[in-house]
Structures are given as C-alpha cells and as structure tokens.
Amino acid sequence: MIETPTDISAAMYAKLLELVLERANSSPTGCLLWIGSTVDGYGTLHFEGKTYKAHRIVALLMVKGWFPGAIVRHTCNTKLCVNDEHLIWGTRRENSNDVIEAGGNRKSRNRGVKNGNASLDEATVLLIKQKLAKGIPQQVIADEFRVSQTAICHINTGKRWSHT
Ligand SMILES: [Zn+2]
C-alpha cells in the first residue's frame, strides 16, 4: 500500500488514477462507485504486483490536505466511492466519529476541483495533457476531472502549468 504522496512518481500516479477512473461508475447519488476488486469493502487496484486502495489514490492526487498518518474519510459514507469531492483527509479518531454520525444530518462537502481555478496537481495535469494529445475533446476531459473547460483550455495552451 502506498502511504504518502511522495512514494511514487507523478507519472505513476497519473497512470493509477486513470486505471481507477476506468473502473468507476457514476451513481444517482453523485458517488463514483468502484466496480473492481475489494478488501474490507474498499476498492483495491492491483497494478504491477502491488495493491493500492482505489479511493486513496484519488485522494492523494485530487484532495488537498494530506498529512503524515492521514487516512481518507468518505463524507458520503460509501466505502466504494472514489469521487474526490466525497473524500477528505482526517484522523482515525475522526473516521470512527463518521461511523457514529452515519445516518445523521451530514452536510455535503465540496472539496473537489469544481472551478476553473482548480487545484489540479502536476500528475493530474500530466494525465490531462496525455488525453489532449490523444485528441479527446476538452469538454469531455473537463467533465471527467470535474473542472471547467477553461481550465483544460489553459492546460492545452500552456497558460498555466507550463513547467510540467
Ligand atoms: Zn460518494
């Protein structure tokens, strides 16, 4: 299991994220549900002899706020969900509280990369560039990463992220 954002290369993250997104289906609740193999109810991705937690890959790439010892919490209480907007970093104690609170009035949280000014990290930008190079339409990519088409356009023209 990978534990920190620096355990593997940006290119590897991009590959893993792509694999995760290939194995997730959207649901009416807004969750992106993992359809691959699972351990303890959580999605697991096997790649090149290693096992990764699907939701953790997404969190490491898409959700800001990682800290040493951080675990990924699901704000939707759906273990199979790999929607970055439903994932937040927390402590084990907070995670236990989540279970206790489950079923109560849970406020939905929007930590995702919704806006054009999104906090896409370099691995994600790399992935988006690969998709652009394949000729995938900007709007399709924007939808996939839940960012504005303007953000994709900026990546395309190198307005931002020109250092990647
Ligand atoms: Zn969810």
Image (cartoon, rainbow, N blue to C red):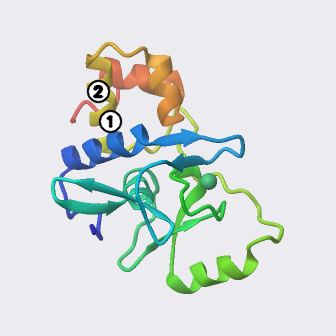
Residue type at mark 2 is Lys
For label 1, the crowd category at 10 Å Cα-Cα, with few meaning under 14, some 14 to 19 and many 20 or more, is some
What residue is rendered at 27% in x and 49% in y? 13
**Residue 107 image point, x, y percent:** 77, 61
Toward the front, the furthest residue is 37
Residue 55, above or below 91: above
Q: Quadrant of the C terminus?
A: top left
For label 2, the crowd category at 10 Å Cα-Cα, with few meaning under 14, some 14 to 19 and many 20 or more, is some
Q: Quadrant of the N terminus?
A: bottom left
What residue is rendered at 58% in x and 79% in y? 95
Q: Is residue 100 left or right of residue 17?
A: right
Q: Which mark is residue 129?
A: 2
**Residue 147 image point, x, y percent:** 52, 33
Measure the C-alpha gap from mark 2 to mark 1: 6 Å
Which quadrant of the structure image shows residue 120?
Answer: top left
Residue 107, above or below 90: above
Residue 88, above or below 148: below
List the residue tagged with mark 1.
125
* Tags 2 and 1 touching, CB below 8 Å: yes
Q: Is residue 16 left or right of residue 12?
A: right
Q: Which mark is residue 112?
A: none
What residue is rendered at 30% in x and 71% in y? 3
